[in-house]
Image: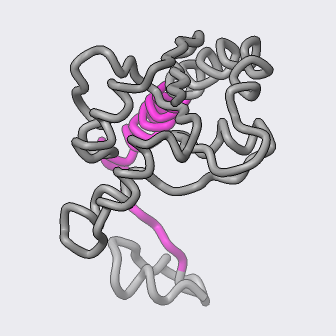
Amino acid sequence: MLVGPVLFGAGRLHPGADQAALKVPKTRCRRLLPWILAVQVVGADMGVATVAWINLSRVSDLSGELTSICSEFPRSGPALVEEAGIARACGHPALLHPFIMTSLSRRGLWNATDFETALSAGEFGTALIDFDPKQPVTGVHLDRWTGPVLNAFRAAPTQTAYPGGVWAVSW
């Protein structure tokens, strides 16, 4: 028995019926609702498809160079990566999350000085980043890395560019 919709909605009891049935009046909005939902679903699918296409294009650029990129990782010891997926694809664990590291440092919850000094001294050997370290850093990369780390990337003696915007920075 559909009592709830009848009591709280626009439904009515059918005369002579032994049960309550939902009879919602047909309005213009009710006829438009399927079209509105279809447009919303198609629009969302187009957005997801665009993002997927961009990511797949980047992956296809990287997949051809993955062997070369993986050769940048040291055989032992830590390697610093901006994207954990690259480290995993090369069989290495992600060392740290740069955004979290920088956020903790800026909030005074973690002292990044030891890390920054070790990076500048070349103790990490290699860093894989998603930007050209020789160019001025803008956008999200300013949120992901502290100033001294960006300076260490810029001053690294070896900087190798790969397709897909990946740079290997080595000391």
Where residue 37 appears, as percent x and y from the top left, is 45, 41
Q: How many marks?
A: 0
Where residue 10 appears, as percent x and y from the top left, is 33, 71
Where residue 158 appears, as percent x and y from the top left, is 50, 18
Residue at image location 44% in from the left, 33% down from the top:
35
Q: Is residue 26 left or right of residue 93?
A: left
Magenta run includes residue 80: no
Q: Could you tell me what secondary structure mostly forms the magenta stretch? A: helix
- State which region is magenta: 21-48
Q: State whether residue 114 is above or below residue 80.
A: below
Where residue 64 appears, as percent x and y from the top left, is 76, 12
Residue at image location 22% in from the left, 27% down from the top:
138
Q: In terms of image quadrants, where is residue 108?
A: bottom left
Identify which residue, 18 or 129, lies in the foreground: 129
**How was the colour assigned to the protein in this rendering?**
one colour
Residue at image location 31% in from the left, 48% down from the top:
27
Q: In terms of image quadrants, where is residue 63?
A: top right
Identify which residue, 56 or 24, lies in the foreground: 56
Q: State whether residue 35 is above or below residue 84.
A: above
Residue at image location 57% in from the left, 34% down from the top:
126
Q: Is residue 60 left or right of residue 160?
A: right
Magenta run includes residue 42: yes
Quarter containing the N terminus: bottom right
Q: State whether residue 149 is above or below residue 133.
A: below
Identify which residue, 40 or 44, lies in the foreground: 44
